[in-house]
Amino acid sequence: MASALRDRGVTDLAKYKFTNAERFAVYVVHGEVCYMCTKPIDLKTMEIDHIIPESLILDRPKLEETLTAFGLSLDFSLNSYENWLPACRSCNGKKGANVFAPTPLVQLQLTKASRRAAQARSLAKRTVKQAEITKALNILEKADESGELSDEVKLHLRAIGNLQEQEREPSRKNEPILLAPNFSIPAHEHSSYHRDELLKSETCGCFFCLRIFNSSEIVCWTDKLPNSEKGETALCPYCGIDSVIGSQSGYPMTHEFLEKMNDRWFGGIRDST
Ligand SMILES: [Zn+2]
Ligand SMILES: [Zn+2]
């Protein structure tokens, strides 16, 4: 019976389809790493592992026996934040092939999931309320994971990076935001905390006044880090707004690109002085 349940066909029948908001929440609250190998993973290819295997849904006696072994109530849902953790494909694939046994390690994993469950639930709720994020997560889901993403797609995906920057675990604050195997955003958005990136950039652009200039023209910086006198975020030498981006970001410093950024961040309101 147990071996029949691990049969691929039967398991697929019980497979829960995660929403993009659930995936994002599990990913962010658990520190953007695989819980098994602890390596950073990207949001697009991350998999959600069921700590207690989902296939047990089809074997009620075995499920009840397992829940009892862990001291969980019999109405514990296998498809809830209390039973979900983020994993990389490789670890999740290996785990799937193993026979499940209730061990102290599994108990620890359940504790880990349940400690963050409320936080994940709340983040998912806030995520679906933001149309821009919902759209960006859909775009990420459909995006090709190999090959180059278009600038248009990257622009949309920045919305996820922005939310993630506010919501991520303090330990991840200085790490790049890994959206897909072929696309990540360096820590701190390109228009803030980017002093080094801008100084290395040949050209810079302002997506408020749409001017393109040399980074040596920047004289005002804001956002000082602790124990530092230098500001990390540039103010545009022409309009004074902190909306400067540099060519080192990987984006094209063209009028067309700055216009798109402007639409995206300022809703098309431009400085015309
Ligand atoms: Zn892993
Ligand atoms: Zn400007």
Image (cartoon, rainbow, N blue to C red):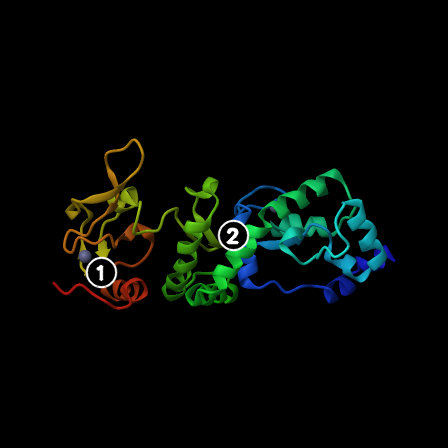
Please state which amino acid type lies under the numbered disc 2: Asp
Q: Which mark is residue 42?
A: 2
| Residue 122, percent from left and from top | 53, 56
Determine which of the numbered discs, if any, sits on residue 208 in the image: 1
Ligand 2 near label 1 (Cβ, under 8 Å)?
yes
Task: Say if disc 2 is inside 8 Å of ligand 1.
Answer: no
Do we see residue 106 in this rendering?
A: yes
Q: Amino acid at mark 1?
A: Phe
Disc ID at residue 257 = none
Q: Is residue 107 above or below residue 237?
A: above
Q: CA distance from mark 1 to mark 2?
A: 31 Å
Answer left or right for 175 relative to 112. Answer: left
Q: Are marks 1 and 2 in contact (CB under 8 Å)?
A: no
Query: Where 221 falls versus 265 (above or below)?
Result: above
Determine the residue positioned at 80% across, 55% down. 63
Residue shown at 26%/44% (left/top)?
A: 200
Q: For mark 2, give the secondary structure.
A: loop
Q: Is residue 45 visible?
A: no
Q: Earlier in the sequence, mark 1 or mark 2?
A: 2
